[in-house]
Amino acid sequence: MCRWAAYRGQPIYLEELVSSPAHSLIEQSHCATRAKTATNADGFGIAWYGDRPEPGRFRDVLPAWSDCNLKSMARQIRSRLFLAHVRAATHGSTRRDNCHPFVCDTWSFMHNGQIDHFDRLRRSMESMLDDEHFNARVGTTDSELLFLLALQFGMRERPLAAMAEAIGFVEQLSLNLTGSAKVRFTAAFSDGHSLHAVRYATDAYAPTLFAAPMGEGGHCLVSEPLNDDTDAWMEIPAGSAVTLSEKGIEVVRFQPAVDGAAVLQPAMAG
Amino acid sequence: MCRWAAYRGQPIYLEELVSSPAHSLIEQSHCATRAKTATNADGFGIAWYGDRPEPGRFRDVLPAWSDCNLKSMARQIRSRLFLAHVRAATHGSTRRDNCHPFVCDTWSFMHNGQIDHFDRLRRSMESMLDDEHFNARVGTTDSELLFLLALQFGMRERPLAAMAEAIGFVEQLSLNLTGSAKVRFTAAFSDGHSLHAVRYATDAYAPTLFAAPMGEGGHCLVSEPLNDDTDAWMEIPAGSAVTLSEKGIEVVRFQPAVDGAAVLQPAMAG
Amino acid sequence: MCRWAAYRGQPIYLEELVSSPAHSLIEQSHCATRAKTATNADGFGIAWYGDRPEPGRFRDVLPAWSDCNLKSMARQIRSRLFLAHVRAATHGSTRRDNCHPFVCDTWSFMHNGQIDHFDRLRRSMESMLDDEHFNARVGTTDSELLFLLALQFGMRERPLAAMAEAIGFVEQLSLNLTGSAKVRFTAAFSDGHSLHAVRYATDAYAPTLFAAPMGEGGHCLVSEPLNDDTDAWMEIPAGSAVTLSEKGIEVVRFQPAVDGAAVLQPAMAG
Amino acid sequence: MCRWAAYRGQPIYLEELVSSPAHSLIEQSHCATRAKTATNADGFGIAWYGDRPEPGRFRDVLPAWSDCNLKSMARQIRSRLFLAHVRAATHGSTRRDNCHPFVCDTWSFMHNGQIDHFDRLRRSMESMLDDEHFNARVGTTDSELLFLLALQFGMRERPLAAMAEAIGFVEQLSLNLTGSAKVRFTAAFSDGHSLHAVRYATDAYAPTLFAAPMGEGGHCLVSEPLNDDTDAWMEIPAGSAVTLSEKGIEVVRFQPAVDGAAVLQPAMAG
């Protein structure tokens, strides 16, 4: 299990999520309160959008709390849309290539959760990738593979539907190969314009997801609140997808798509 | 606060302290139970004696739990006397040069604890060093500086007395410069023949220290027990020094030496 | 292109190859003389056999010349059979998992050279692996993949024949997929008993390989000589395999096996 | 010896110095042509000024050519004034704290060159520092110490004069302590407004320094030209200081100040 935070709105310094709040992401790297593991010290990463279509990215393997580069960059870089992540490894060794966010052309992705039985599913999942996305794989995590599958399933055109198909595919595959399936998945992803997040689990234990307004008309999405201001944080229910865009915040139901039939229905609007 | 374990006896694989026990040092790097901080993830190190007079040493900045080099080496290297440490940084950034054990010629040293007001004492402590020991300093920790002071005060000839003088000097200096003094110090050190450990604090909260027999006629010294076999572990009282040598285990009283008058009296014998 | 050195014989300190000679492996990490690239600074690794059937291993991403762990370990560890490697990356990013030697159960392997068009061959090569060897893959190099293919083709029972089949398979695959084939391959591999090396290239430019006696009845194999004593170093001709075992040094012809028909004929005996 | 490049002008992407030019700084990290050593692989660093008075900074120990973070950041970050450096270690181990640029409040500094006999001068140089600058020291290089000395000598108010005094002090100290003195010093430093560079050596071998116009009204200063356009690059003569400011480029004579009498005379104007 990992911790993450993402923002979309008027440009703010990354530190406003990463290091300044009372319960900032760096704070969560050693004492997360709503995660299965309090320590998220197997590396970290940020992806931020500026003037180019593709994001900048910085990842490293030290615990976030002890990396002086991270602190300096978070204090210096301002962005209108960024993702930040601290990792507690489940699948894949501690190395930069396994740190979130993952980036593929203009898209970025980060994840908290895991796929049960991943060791038995990995090869079949990889074999689903076309050559373009197969060659884009550099690490060994389940998270990167979910991202690449979603890209292949059409994320660039219909991000939530493709993600629903990717998770549905993995659940189906797991049922076929292992007789059971469990995916826990709270993730954020973006093309540099909209920022999406999904909270879902096959069972009743979807990792938490919260949203709050931030800055002038902006919002942040986080795996746990950045401070004690309980009024500010809206918990996103399990089985939901959130989209931050020019239209504000929109929350819809999310469930895995079986046989290509993604089911995405309007649920709530913010 | 940090965690450490040391051994003297017939050669054993390092893993018998580092990774194999139920509550091994690697386990303690993420869930120590008797430390101020459960997480000791700011690097690690080992120093082991083989056929040469000086020890081999391996240190790195990743959390011990995620370093594959450490696991492989602990499984392959056998030693008759070794020190192993996982760090939770108090003074000094996360980098190899600040990881314990520190080594100077044939001597090795590692420490759990800290010197209060170290930022205000550091310069005066460094200025006490003669050129030889000043040039041997490579990091920025209080621990390394205590080690170098003790070496300069005669550790090579009378290890416990010199350590008592070093601590006494620091307490006196702190009183003079800051009006108060607090040193917490549970440390192990060796010349490759005997293995010494000290448990001491200026106040009533000396970091814990335990001893247990291990292997054929050997002993280990640890900051917290490596398993639940409570009968096996003898807690060393605060204000004590332990020496493991050919003569077995010996515990004596330890208190800082003021004005060069080290006070070391026999207390208990194991 | 990389540089490597290997040894089999009476136990010697690793430093006798790694750091002590005038043109030691560490020296070659910044000024190799017979390599395509003088600088081999994309990490390093050692694998050494001791009392256990599997080797110990230590790899890291810094240039070998600046790693203090490597120097200390090479000075402290003695081994009867070891492999040491400094890397100049061709395929695969700079990370520990891509550093040689690669290890699988009791086998170790390191390589200098490369497979042309590897980006177009990688997926097919990986798909040849059975699940056991597929799951053993952790990096992204062509070298690791050649090692795993050879293991799958029977390296544990007939090391040189399996390696000949692995190279033959890759050449054939490259011809089929890209219309041409070029493999350059000077590698060493061992099960902890015998030490094998191969010098081969599809074209006329096989990376160099030299052998020399070392210690009492031992030998070393290197990609370039460790000193200027030209009488001591025997150049192994291209298209050869060398085996160091209890029987001494043996050199045979080596050529890739096509259709499973490995061709290995006696050539010279040392 | 190291390589560096610095820029002042309209905001440009860092990559225009770091990675895009034919002979970019990353290219120079493995094949510098005018340095004593072609390989500058002992880490790298950048310091860039944005909206805050203090610069952002990113440093790491890998060779610049293999660090994916550096490439991504150089492509994403735009700055009106920045310093970039690749290191070939002379004094001080390979670790982040020893990588240039050094930063102290709003000031940044990077250096190519060295102080002869530094091991014998270090302690006296450090003892010159007042507590503020002593506590600001985190590494072990001669370069950082020169920077801190200059800050203490008044760099914040009169940058070139203070630097002249710092070098003069070191030369005098070296004469007193070792009987001879040799400082080679080509450095750049900035407060975020003006960018200064100095080319100087006690002997006739001052490391090279070049200037060229870049972007709209901007300039860059480099230890060697970034491309083959020989007309564009003006070599700055030894014994000179360059200042880039709102007034354009200004070159004056530079020589060490003895007894506090800094000698800075106008030489040429660009």
Image (cartoon, coloured by chain):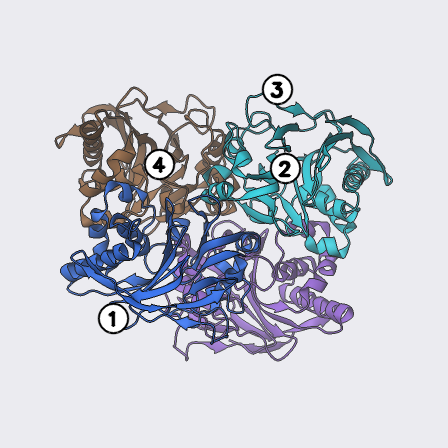
Chain colours: A blue, B purple, C brown, D cyan
- The answer to which image quadrant residue C202 occupies is top left
Q: Chain of mark 2?
A: D
- The answer to which image quadrant residue D142 occupies is top right
Q: Mark 1 = which residue? A: A203
Q: Chain of mark 1?
A: A
C-alpha gap between disc 1 and disc 3: 69 Å
Q: Nearer the viewer, mark 2 or mark 3?
A: 2
C53 shown above or below C205: below
Q: Nearer the viewer, mark 1 or mark 3?
A: 3
Secondary structure under tag 1 reads loop
Q: Mark 3 = which residue? A: D231
C-alpha gap between disc 2 and disc 1: 57 Å
C-alpha gap between disc 4 and disc 2: 38 Å
Q: Label 1 sits on what residue type?
A: Asp
Q: Picture coordinates of residue D182 (x, y %)?
A: 74, 32
Q: Nearer the viewer, mark 4 or mark 1?
A: 1
**Pointer 4 and pointer 1 on the same chain:** no
Q: Mark 2 = which residue? A: D9
- Asked whether B137 or B29 is in front, the reply is B29
Q: Chain of mark 4?
A: C
Secondary structure under tag 2 reads strand
Q: Nearer the viewer, mark 4 or mark 2?
A: 2
C-alpha gap between disc 3 and disc 4: 38 Å
Q: Mark on residue C91?
A: 4
